[in-house]
Image (cartoon, helix red, strand yellow):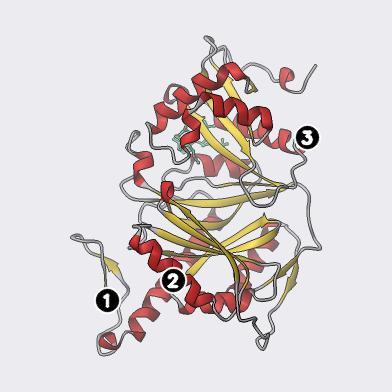
Amino acid sequence: MSFLSSIPPIVDHGLAIDRFRDEDASSLVDLFRTIYGDAYPCPDVYDPDYLAGANRQGTICSYVCRDQTGRVAAHLALVRSAPFAGAMEVAQGLVHPTYRGAGLLSRLMDLVIEEAGRSHDCETLFATPVCNHVMSQRSLASAGFTDAAFEIDYTPARLFAKEGASRGRVATLFAFRTLKPSPDLDMHLPRAYAPVITDLFRQAGTPRRFVHPHTDLPLPTTSVAEVADVPTLDLTKITVARAGRDLADRVLAVERQARSSDRAVVQVLVDMGTPTVDAAVEMLRAAGYWFGGVLPRYLNADALLMQKTLSTPNFEEVKVYAPAARTLLQVVQGDWFRANVSVLITAPRDRTRAMAPPHRTADNGQLHA
Ligand SMILES: CC(C)(COP(=O)(O)OP(=O)(O)OC[C@H]1O[C@@H](n2cnc3c(N)ncnc32)[C@H](O)[C@@H]1OP(=O)(O)O)[C@@H](O)C(=O)NCCC(=O)NCCS
């Protein structure tokens, strides 16, 4: 008997959890459409052939819950979406509105975690639960995930229009669960955030070899970095493998391009396996970027997230489940404030004005001191 066939049916509603089969593809497309309309940021999910093919190839490993008629009532997948092949994302959690609140997401969660270790040679799991509700965060916390970063304004509001689930852009958390510990992995710490990062890893029980920075480290002239533009999320992402003296100029050039293309967010991921992480963070802070957290093992090495929203971030609608995540959000929001206050201080015409926290106005949402 296979592991999956040993799963008992859910209560007496005739629902059955199973690995995805080719014949589920059209019904899964319908479920995406029921929840997101046509707005899901990866348009491939509306193509049954893509879903079936990706599941055959193993780039997506979908698990479904079928109702009595065989239609897909709920879905959760393991997706190879990170640069590190040993990391898998627990993603695309969907439960048809008729079946919500009955524990389907949590049942699927337990299953995919078992399967990740058993069948997919996975070293670390991560998930990016949305913050316009706490249900996914709660299910992940119950399944042993730790929240490690906030990606503020990551998701466009249009994604949630069908269910009327948000007014503004929606933040996501980056939550992780280690399956195979890597205590010998070097993590180069930036001075600015060393205490919050080391606390986070210690509280999660995730061992690392913490390396403190040398402030006189000579930097190469040129950075090694990759830029990815993601129009479906209105987002531009820069991944910095090694910082050079040109980093700030290069990031600001990418940011100018992002602004002219109406992007909402620029994210910078800094590889924490390299000693230039502290210098990178100092340059980014001076350029108005603020702390998001750490994406453990996202690049195989951990990645430090720095971010900048190109208009006032939607902190007001962020809903958080775990107390530790609430503390992390305070750090993130405090650092956003630091980045914006320092801009105000260095702007000459603001020098004579009284300092006050930036706030959102009712009319145009701009920052005012
Ligand atoms: C989010 C979603 C998948 C949840 O599915 P679900 O089957 O109703 O969730 P569950 O019943 O398994 O509940 C998940 C957790 O939230 C809790 N929960 C359920 N309803 C809740 C509510 N109204 N308020 C607070 N917590 C709630 C459950 O107790 C459970 O926590 P536990 O594991 O600690 O017991 C579903 O609402 C959905 O499809 N939403 C739209 C798409 C979406 O937002 N997907 C998530 C993207 S990250």
Answer with mark 1 or mark 2, whichever residue precedes in sequence.
2
Q: Position of residue 81 (x, y in %)?
A: 61, 45
In the image, residue 335 above or below residue 298: below
Label 1 – label 2 distance at C-alpha? 27 Å
Tell me the quarter of the image containing the N terminus.
top right
Residue type pointed to by label 3: Arg
Q: Are marks 1 and 3 in contact (CB under 8 Å)?
A: no
Q: Amino acid at mark 2?
A: Ala
Amino acid type at mark 1 = Ala
Q: Which residue is located at x 70 percent, y 63 percent? A: 202
* Disc 2 crowd, CA 10 A, few/some/many (<14, 14-19, 20+): few
Give the camera-side residue of 200 and 154.
Answer: 154
Residue 103 in sight: no
Quadrant of image for the C terminus: bottom left
Left or right of residue 84, residue 284 in this image: left
Q: Which mark is residue 369?
A: 1
- Label 3 vs label 2, nearer the camera: 2
- SS of the residue under disc 1: loop
Residue labelled with disc 3: 118
Give the side of residue 115 with respect to residue 295, left or right. right
Q: State yes or no: Cβ of the residue under disc 1 lies below 8 Å from any atom of ligand 1.
A: no
Q: Secondary structure at mark 2?
A: helix
CB atoms of marks 3 and 2 within 8 Å: no
